[in-house]
Image (tube, rainbow, N blue to C red):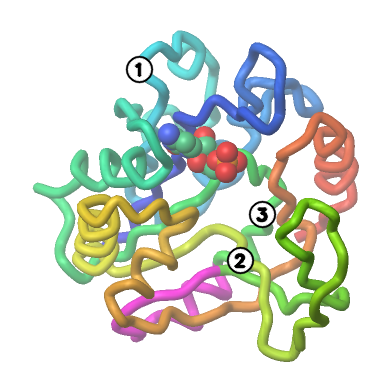
């Protein structure tokens, strides 16, 4: 059985602002993109890393990577789900239906390899897959929809988790799920949502909270700090 990794990197980072997509911003000695790909390419189990990039991206292929032979760039699509599906199309003829596909945001350079190894162990004989996630710690409030942000409810948090990546599924399930979600024009924001739409119940695998997603400029300094502190 093979493990494939798709790292969607075709987004323009609208929330981040600025000209340069966030994956090309400096993080320590290199960029967010190089840090994420170099870290994940050290996982021996991963056969190939497929990186969907924007059709006009002229940076990704020019950067240097620790294991360039593992990385394959493909053209991404309009939405994240289109980009991930483009990655799946690229391996369709080589992948077996029960091969594992991991999808990881390029903007999460701090993911711990020990969490991914734990995910491999936990999901080893699972028929569907699961995602790295963490139980919600804060009290969760629901806001009014009139733009005034009045609290209209306190949501019980016992069963609430925040979803991270990697998200890991059997090839045939994730392929079917994303094709179905896109055909329905359902704007899923992660792969698990698409799999859930098919009626499956992916597992939540507890991961470290420092798996930060770089969303705003101030997150870069925090990511740099977290990476310096990490020992696993
Ligand atoms: O914008 P956001 O941080 O939610 O994007 C999540 C991930 O999806 C990023 O890695 C981004 O590059 C990727 N993406 C993509 N294709 C798109 C939109 C987003 O690969 N069309």
What residue sits right under mark 3 in the picture? 111
**In the rendering, which numbered label is found on residue 55?**
1
Tell me the mark number nearer the camera, choosing from 1 and 3. 1
Residue at 89%, 51% (x, y): give it.
229
User: Would residue 127 be counted in the magenta stretch?
Assistant: yes
Q: Are marks 2 and 1 in contact (CB under 8 Å)?
A: no
Residue 55 locus on image (x, y percent): 35, 17
User: Would residue 86 be counted in the magenta stretch?
Assistant: no
**In the rendering, which numbered label is found on residue 171?**
none
Q: Image check: 165 left or right of 197? A: right
Q: Secondary structure at mark 2?
A: strand
Q: Which residues are magenta?
A: 117-131
Residue 51 locus on image (x, y percent): 40, 34
Q: Which image quadrant: the C terminus?
A: bottom right
Residue toward you, 180 or 2:
180
Q: Secondary structure at mark 1?
A: loop
**In the rendering, which numbered label is found on residue 163?**
2
Tell me if the residue at label 1 has its CB under 8 Å from ligand 1: no
């Amino acid at each position: 059985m093979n493990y494939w990794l798709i790292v969607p990197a075709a987004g323009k980072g609208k929330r981040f602002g600025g000209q340069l997509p966030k994956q090309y911003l400096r993080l320590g000695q290199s960029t967010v993109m190089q840090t994420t790909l170099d870290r994940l390419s050290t996982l021996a189990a991963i056969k190939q890393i497929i990186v969907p990039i924007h059709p006009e991206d002229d940076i990704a292929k020019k950067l240097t990577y620790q294991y360039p032979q593992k990385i394959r760039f493909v053209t991404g699509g309009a939405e994240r789900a289109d980009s991930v599906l483009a990655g799946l199309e690229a391996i369709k003829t080589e992948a077996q239906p029960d091969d594992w596909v991991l999808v990881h945001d390029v903007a999460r350079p701090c993911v711990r390899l020990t969490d991914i190894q734990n995910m491999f162990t936990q999901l080893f004989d699972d028929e569907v897959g699961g995602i790295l996630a963490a139980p919600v710690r804060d009290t969760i409030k629901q806001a009014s929809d009139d733009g005034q942000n009045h609290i209209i409810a306190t949501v019980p948090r016992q069963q609430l988790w925040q979803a991270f990546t990697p998200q890991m599924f059997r090839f045939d399930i994730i392929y079917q799920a994303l094709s179905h979600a896109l055909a329905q024009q359902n704007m899923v924001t992660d792969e698990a949502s698409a799999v859930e739409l098919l009626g499956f119940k992916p597992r939540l695998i507890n991961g470290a909270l420092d798996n930060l997603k770089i969303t705003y400029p101030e997150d870069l300094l925090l990511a740099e700090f977290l990476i310096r502190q990490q020992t696993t």
